[in-house]
Image: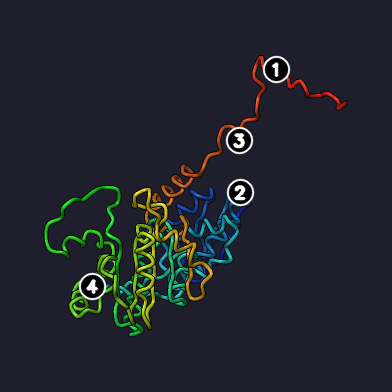
């Protein structure tokens, strides 16, 4: 057992790190098996030597983020603990990046993980960015935030959001209403992100003016999209023909983000995913970047990350029994008559 003491510079940062009713502190204690208390203007950490060292690095990293205005929650704590456990605590200082966008309610949107930061930087620095990763990694949300930011800064004149109209495993059948009513269920995630960024009234105003367009992918054929920020969501469900069609719509002054999860393809088995093919075809082309997000970048409920990891383990190809087991001689089998004889 050992104990170390960390001086407290600003109590408001400590309160932020500890969380409401010390819930963040309890999480650190549970994950590392240490005891943490604040007493006499110091944070006291006690426990096994290695665990105490990890707790010190994690708390110092969280205090650094708090000092830079980050609001510390359980997701931050889990991610910092993961970085410390992997020996990458030096990367913590890179997490407090620039604000991507401010929502209609004044909430700042930032990248919360190193993978998300690389993704946001790629969008800013390239004409075409492919963001590939599991659910909950912020692929669509951060892309919409970047689009709204570019539109507010008058870098583009339009935001165009599109996705293929493919059911996720079930058949919806006939949908009543006009054309917009029929495609709305497929585009709902894009609407939700735009409503949060712009507010319902502002969104409606820009939609009426034609500054915002939300449409199924089929409506992109034959168009040239200039001065636009274009997001293709759920791209794993595009065919190779649809992907090629979409990529050739890009006009001057436009920026494109393509997002998808190659583990959730809803196409028929005999069809190739346009996203998977695009990754193979476009890799290495200048001004196109492919960003891969992982389960470590999930910012939803902690269970989502565990679910993704469980499926990854389950779906790993298993070696056939013949490759794992040494061959055994069958009872009664005859020896090779030539085995062990010297050549004549």
Query: Foreground mark, 4 or 2?
Result: 4
* Horizontal relation, residue 220 to residue 29: left or right: left
Query: Foreground mark, 4 or 1?
Result: 1
Return the residue found at the far front: 344
Name the N-terminal-most of marks 3 and 1.
3
Specify how the rendered protein is coloured. Answer: rainbow
21 or 310: which is nearer to us?
310
Q: Secondary structure at mark 1?
A: loop
11 or 225: which is nearer to us?
225
- Residue 161: where, in percent of width, then height? 30, 70
Query: Foreground mark, 1 or 2?
Result: 1
The quarter of the rendered structure image containing the C terminus is top right
Query: Foreground mark, 4 or 3?
Result: 3
Q: Are marks 3 and 2 in contact (CB under 8 Å)?
A: no
Q: Which mark, residue 199?
A: 4
Name the N-terminal-most of marks 1 and 2.
2
Q: Is residue 121 above or below residue 77?
A: below
Circle 3 packing at 10 Å, graded few (<14), some (14-19), many (20+), is: few
Question: What residue would you read off at disc 3?
Answer: 323
Query: Foreground mark, 3 or 2?
Result: 3
Question: What residue would you read off at disc 1?
Answer: 334
Question: What residue would you read off at disc 2?
Answer: 48
- Work out how far the residue at label 1 is from the one at label 2, CA to CA, in angstroms: 61 Å
């Amino acid at each position: 057992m050992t104990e170390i003491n960390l001086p407290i510079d600003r109590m408001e940062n400590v309160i932020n790190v500890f969380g409401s009713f010390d819930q963040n502190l309890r999480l650190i204690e549970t994950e590392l098996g240490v005891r943490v208390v604040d007493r006499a203007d110091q944070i006291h950490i006690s426990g096994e030597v290695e665990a105490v060292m990890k707790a010190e690095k994690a708390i110092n990293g969280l205090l650094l983020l708090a000092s830079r205005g980050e609001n510390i929650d359980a997701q931050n704590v889990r991610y910092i603990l993961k970085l410390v456990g992997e020996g990458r605590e030096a990367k913590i200082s890179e997490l407090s990046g620039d604000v991507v966008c401010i929502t209609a309610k004044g909430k700042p949107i930032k990248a919360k993980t190193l993978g998300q930061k690389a993704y946001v930087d790629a969008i800013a620095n390239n004409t075409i960015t492919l963001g590939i990763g599991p659910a909950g990694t912020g692929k669509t949300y951060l892309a919409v935030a970047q689009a709204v930011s570019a539109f507010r800064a008058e870098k583009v004149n339009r935001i165009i959001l599109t996705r293929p109209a493919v059911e996720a495993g079930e058949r919806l059948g006939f949908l009543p209403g006009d054309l917009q009513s029929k495609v709305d269920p497929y585009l709902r995630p894009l609407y939700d992100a735009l409503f949060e960024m712009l507010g319902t009234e502002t969104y409606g105003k820009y939609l009426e003016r034609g500054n915002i367009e939300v449409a199924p992918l089929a409506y992109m054929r034959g168009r040239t999209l200039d001065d636009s920020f274009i997001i293709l969501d759920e791209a794993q469900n595009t065919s190779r023909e649809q992907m090629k069609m979409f990529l050739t719509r890009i006009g001057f002054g436009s920026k494109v983000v393509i997002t998808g999860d190659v583990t959730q393809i809803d196409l028929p088995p005999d069809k190739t995913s346009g996203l998977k093919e695009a990754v193979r075809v476009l890799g290495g082309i200048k001004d196109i970047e492919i960003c891969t997000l992982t389960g470590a970048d999930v910012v939803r409920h902690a269970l989502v990350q565990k679910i993704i990891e469980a499926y990854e383990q389950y779906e790993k190809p298993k070696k056939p029994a013949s490759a794992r087991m040494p061959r055994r001689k069958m009872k009664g089998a005859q020896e090779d008559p030539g085995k062990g004889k010297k050549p004549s």
